Image: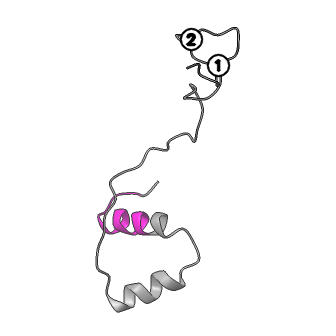
Amino acid sequence: MQNKNLSSSQTPSESPSWGGARSGAGRKSKPHGKSYTFQSTPEVDAFLSSYQGNKTEFINRAILTLAGQSPE
């Protein structure tokens, strides 16, 4: 039985030039830290629900400020 996906010039040991992984393809990764899950108080939940900006950036800045480190 012959593989119908191969062109007439390809032998079964050759792989086609299409499909599969390509170097440099896909979304570039961004440096990131660990994900955390926590239970918020009702007040924090109300604030974060109404906050229009990037919640991750806000939380990171708030923690660094409270810890006495300068947020970038």
Q: What span is colored magenta in the figure?
A: 59-70
C-alpha span from label 1 to label 2: 9 Å
Mark 1–mark 2 CB contact (< 8 Å): yes
User: Residue at label 1?
Assistant: 6
The residue positioned farthest toward the front in the image shown:
1
Q: At numbered mark 1, what does the secondary structure look like: helix, strand or loop?
A: loop
Task: Identify the residue shown where x is 57% and y is 42%.
Answer: 27
* Residue 16 belongs to the span the image colors magenta: no
* Residue type at numbered disc 2: Glu
Label annotation for residue 51? none
- Measured from the top left, where is residue 56 in percent x and y? 46, 65
- Measured from the top left, where is residue 44 in percent x and y? 38, 85
- Measured from the top left, where is residue 53 in percent x and y? 57, 72
Is 72 situated left or right of 42 in this image? Answer: right
Q: At numbered mark 2, what does the secondary structure look like: helix, strand or loop?
A: loop
User: Residue at label 2?
Assistant: 14
Query: Within the image, what quadrant is residue 46 found in?
Result: bottom left
**Magenta span: helix, strand or loop, mainly?**
helix
- Vertical arrangement, residue 39 with respect to residue 13, above or below: below
- Vertical arrangement, residue 40 with respect to residue 23, above or below: below
Query: Within the image, what quadrant is residue 17 found in?
Result: top right
Q: Nearer the viewer, residue 40 or 11?
A: 11
Q: Tag 1: Cα neighbours inside 10 Å, few (<14), some, or many (≥20)?
A: few
Name the front one of labels 1 and 2: 1
Q: Tag 2: Cα neighbours inside 10 Å, few (<14), some, or many (≥20)?
A: few
Q: Nearer the viewer, residue 41 or 22?
A: 22
* Residue type at numbered disc 1: Leu
Q: Nearer the viewer, residue 27 or 47?
A: 27
- In this figure, what is the number of numbered marks? 2
Task: Identify the residue shown where x is 58% and y is 26%.
Answer: 22
Which quarter of the rendering shows the N terminus?
Answer: top right
